[in-house]
C-alpha cells in the first residue's frame, strides 16, 4: 500500500519542491519494518513509504526454498518543524541497513515488489577477489569459498572447519571493515548418526565417542602416542603373537621311561616390547 507521509508533503510544499507520487518504473528505498507474512515497509528515496511490500526470492515454494531477511536497524526519523518523517539514509548501526530495489508490477504504484538488494558505500560485504563466495549470517556464522576451492565454515566462538589450505583466510584483506560478531563462550560440537553412534567435542575440549557397534582403527604405523593423567599404559610390540617352543612328557612312574613329546601349546609372546 502506498502512503505518503503528511509531514514530508508539508515539508516539500514549504521548500517549494512539491511532493510527486512516482508512477511506474522502479526506485530504491530502505527497509524500515518487516511483518510476519514476509512483507516489509520501505521508505523510498523520494520520501514515499510503501507498506507490506512482498519480497522476491531466488527459489521459493509454499513448502520449500530459501528464506532469510537480515535483522535491520530502523531508519532514524528526522524531526523538524513540519513533523517527523523517515529518510532512507545509512544508519550504520550494529545490525546494518537493508537497501532494496523496488519495482512496480504493470507500472502501478499500487503493486510494488522488492526484486533485490544492494550495498551502501560503507559496508562489510563487498570483496576484491573475483569469484569469492561469502554467506554470512547476523549471528556471526559464515561460510567462504575461494576460487581455488578452499572452503571454510566459521562459528562465533572461534571454532572452524577448513578444507583446502591448512590456515584460515584473512577476510580483512578483502574488506578492511570485515568484523562478524563473536562470542567468548565455547559451544559443543556433536555428530549424531541415525544408528545412535555419536561423536561429541565438549566446550572444555573433551572428545566423547559413543558407538553402538565396534570401533575399528587401522593405520600403517603408529607415528606417536601421548597420554595424560588417568590414562592406562599402552603396550607396543613388533610381534604380538608367536609360538613358544615348549613341550611336555608323561610317565607312568618316577624314573620310568617318558612318552614322546606332546604337541606344543600356543602362547602369547612379544619382542621389542615397550610401554607408554
Image: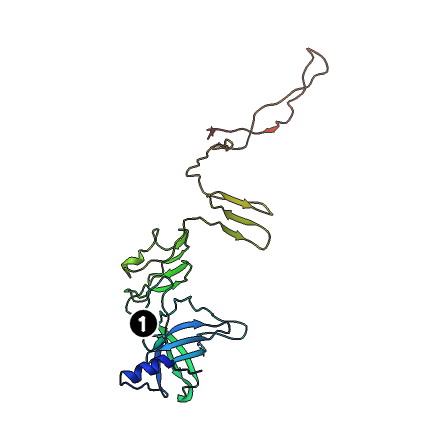
Work out whether residue 226 or residue 2 is closer to the camera in this orientation and state it.
2
Quadrant where the N terminus sits is: bottom left
Percent of width and height locating residue 98: 37, 70
Outermost front residue: 81
Work out whether residue 136 or residue 18 is closer to the camera in this orientation and state it.
18
Q: Residue at x 28, y 85 (%)?
A: 17
Percent of width and height locating residue 143: 39, 60
Q: Is residue 216 visible?
A: no
Under circle 1, the secondary element is loop
**223 up-or-down from 119: above or below:** above
Question: In this image, 20 relative to 205: left or right?
Answer: left
Q: Is residue 146 visible?
A: yes
Q: Which residue is mark 1?
A: 89
**86 up-or-down from 189: above or below:** below
**222 up-or-down from 86: above or below:** above
Outermost right residue: 252
Badge 1 crowding class, 10 Å Cα cut-off, few under 14, some 14 to 19, many 20 or more, is: some
Work out whether residue 236 or residue 197 is closer to the camera in this orientation and state it.
197
**136 up-or-down from 52: above or below:** above
Percent of width and height locating residue 40: 44, 74
Question: In this image, 266 relative to 78: left or right?
Answer: right
Work out whether residue 264 or residue 233 is closer to the camera in this orientation and state it.
233
Outermost top residue: 255
Q: Residue at x 69, y 12 (%)?
A: 256
What is the count of numbered marks?
1
Quadrant of residue 156 within the rendered picture: bottom left
Q: Residue at x 67, y 17 (%)?
A: 258
Percent of width and height locating residue 122: 28, 66
Colour scheme employed for the rendering of this structure: rainbow
Quadrant of residue 2 within the rendered picture: bottom left
Amino acid at each position: 500500500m502506498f502512503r505518503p507521509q503528511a509531514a514530508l508533503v508539508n515539508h516539500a510544499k514549504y521548500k517549494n519542491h512539491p511532493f510527486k507520487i512516482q508512477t511506474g518504473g522502479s526506485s530504491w528505498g530502505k527497509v524500515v519494518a518487516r511483518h510476519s507474512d514476509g512483507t516489509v515497509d520501505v521508505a523510498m528515496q523520494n520520501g514515499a513509504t510503501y507498506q507490506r511490500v512482498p519480497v522476491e526470492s531466488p527459489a521459493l515454494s509454499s513448502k520449500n526454498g530459501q528464506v532469510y531477511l537480515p535483522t535491520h536497524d530502523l531508519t532514524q526519523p528526522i524531526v523538524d518543524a513540519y513533523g517527523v518523517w523517515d529518510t532512507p539514509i545509512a544508519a550504520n548501526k550494529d545490525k546494518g541497513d537493508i537497501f532494496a530495489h523496488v519495482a512496480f508490477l504493470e507500472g502501478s504504484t499500487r503493486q510494488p515488489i522488492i526484486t533485490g538488494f544492494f550495498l551502501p558505500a560503507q559496508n562489510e560485504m563487498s570483496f576484491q577477489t573475483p569469484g569469492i563466495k561469502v554467506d554470512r549470517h547476523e549471528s556471526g556464522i559464515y561460510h567462504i569459498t575461494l576460487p581455488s576451492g578452499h572452503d571454510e565454515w566459521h562459528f562465533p566462538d572461534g571454532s572452524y572447519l577448513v578444507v583446502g589450505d591448512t590456515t584460515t583466510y584473512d577476510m580483512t584483506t578483502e574488506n578492511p571493515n570485515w568484523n562478524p560478531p563473536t562470542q567468548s563462550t565455547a559451544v559443543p560440537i556433536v555428530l549424531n548418526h541415525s544408528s545412535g553412534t555419536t561423536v561429541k567435542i565438549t566446550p572444555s575440549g573433551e572428545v566423547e565417542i559413543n558407538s553402538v557397534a565396534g570401533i575399528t582403527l587401522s593405520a600403517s604405523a603408529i607415528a606417536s602416542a601421548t597420554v595424560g593423567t588417568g590414562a592406562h599404559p599402552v603396550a607396543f610390540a613388533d610381534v604380538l603373537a608367536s609360538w613358544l617352543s615348549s613341550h611336555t612328557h608323561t610317565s607312568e612312574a618316577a624314573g620310568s621311561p617318558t612318552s614322546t613329546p606332546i604337541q606344543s601349546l600356543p602362547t602369547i609372546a612379544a619382542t621389542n616390547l615397550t610401554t607408554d
